[in-house]
Image: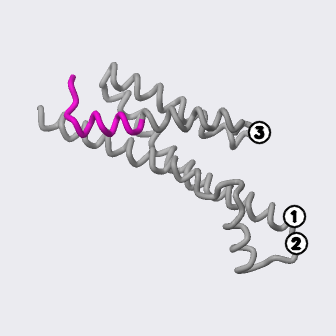
Amino acid sequence: MRFPPIDRFLLLIVTLGLCATLVELVLEEHTESFFQWIPIGLIAAALGALAWNQIAQGAASGRVLRVVWVLFLVSGVVGVGLHWKGKIEFQLESSPSLSGWDLFRQAMKSKTPPALAPGVMVQFGLVGLAFQAAQKGRRSKEK
């Protein structure tokens, strides 16, 4: 089945983004704890599910892919929370007297861990769901 241009574009965006993010996470050694392995595992699962969905294009592969995209949304939100917690802990270790607005400001100014970086998982989840919605809409019109 040949996809219309927007479907191919969404598929290209999510696939390239997943591959680039996987390479970055591996190079950054984002592997120190169980939680750091979650985005790596989800990206691998997404790439596998995308491949399966493109080959099989069945209901089962579509459901699995949808579950993976929802897990991306959840992991992105949880990841932002974990990164934020790490920033706060680091700031409190170096300046235990910080609190309130000063603590927030110092944490936001610090470079590691990047507080909003896990938000990319939310973006992947949304683009992936948009791709699936576009596919589903076209399939229902074909019937």
Mark 1–mark 2 distance (CA, rounded to whole Å): 6 Å
Q: Position of residue 114 (x, y in %)?
A: 65, 55
Q: Mark 1 points at which residue?
A: 93
Q: Name the residue under label 2.
A: 96
120 versus 20 height, above or below: below
| Callout 2 secondary element | loop
Residue 140 lies in quadrant: top left
Q: Answer few, some or many: residues within 10 Å of disc 1's Cα (few below 14, many 20 plus, some between 14 and 19).
A: few
| Earlier sequence position, callout 2 versus callout 3 | 3
Under mark 2, the amino acid is: Pro
Q: Answer few, some or many: residues within 10 Å of disc 3's Cα (few below 14, many 20 plus, some between 14 and 19).
A: few
Residues marked 1 and 2 touching at CB (< 8 Å):
yes
Under mark 3, the amino acid is: Glu
Q: Answer few, some or many: residues within 10 Å of disc 2's Cα (few below 14, many 20 plus, some between 14 and 19).
A: few
Q: Where is residue 123 in the image (x, y as percent from the top left)?
A: 45, 49
The magenta stretch is 1-14
Q: Give the label on residue 32, or none.
A: 3
Q: Where is residue 18 in the image (x, y as percent from the top left)?
A: 49, 36
- Give the position of the N terminus as an image quadrant: top left
Mark 2–mark 3 distance (CA, rounded to whole Å): 25 Å
By secondary structure, the bulk of the magenta-drawn segment is best described as helix
